[in-house]
Image: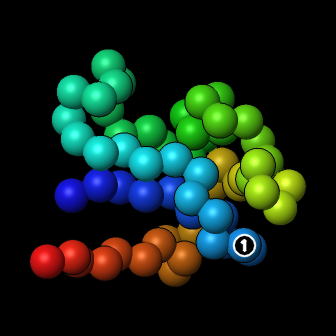
Amino acid sequence: MPIIYKCSKCDHTIYVFMRAGQDYYGVPSPSELIVKVGNVCPNCKKPIEPSVDISRVIIKVSR
């Protein structure tokens, strides 16, 4: 099941981690994601925040 990072403002998909072995380091943290893709959303230019606010994490199970 993929892990999808989306912009909290425009819902644009910023990064998708599909499976183990995709990346040497594994699932990126928000601060590692900034290094990979930059510090703003490529769609709406909202700054990506390196801190995690657990109340904004959404977990969805797809079948």
* Residue at the disc numbered 1: 10
**Residue 25 rendering spot, x and y as whole percentages:** 35, 24
Q: With respect to residue 63, does 38 lie above or below?
A: above
Q: At x 76% / y 49%, what residue is drawn?
A: 42
Number of numbered discs on residues: 1
Q: Left or right: 8 with respect to 6?
A: right
Q: Residue furthest top?
A: 24
Q: Which amino acid type is marked by label 1?
A: Cys
Q: Residues within 10 Å of mark 1 (few under 14, many from 20)?
A: few
Q: Left or right: 9 with respect to 2?
A: right
**Residue 6 rendering spot, x and y as whole percentages:** 57, 63
Q: How is the image coloured?
A: rainbow
Q: Quadrant of the C terminus?
A: bottom left
Q: Quadrant of the N terminus?
A: bottom left
Q: At x 44% / y 39%, what residue is drawn?
A: 28
Q: At x 21% / y 76%, what residue is drawn?
A: 62
Q: At x 43% / y 77%, what residue is drawn?
A: 58
Q: Left or right: 17 with respect to 46?
A: left
Residue 53 falls in which quadrant of the image? bottom right
Q: With respect to residue 38, does 43 lie above or below?
A: below
Q: With respect to residue 49, does 27 lie above or below?
A: above
Q: Residue furthest right?
A: 45
Nearer to me, 23 or 13: 13
Residue 38 falls in which quadrant of the image? top right
- Secondary structure, mark 1, is loop
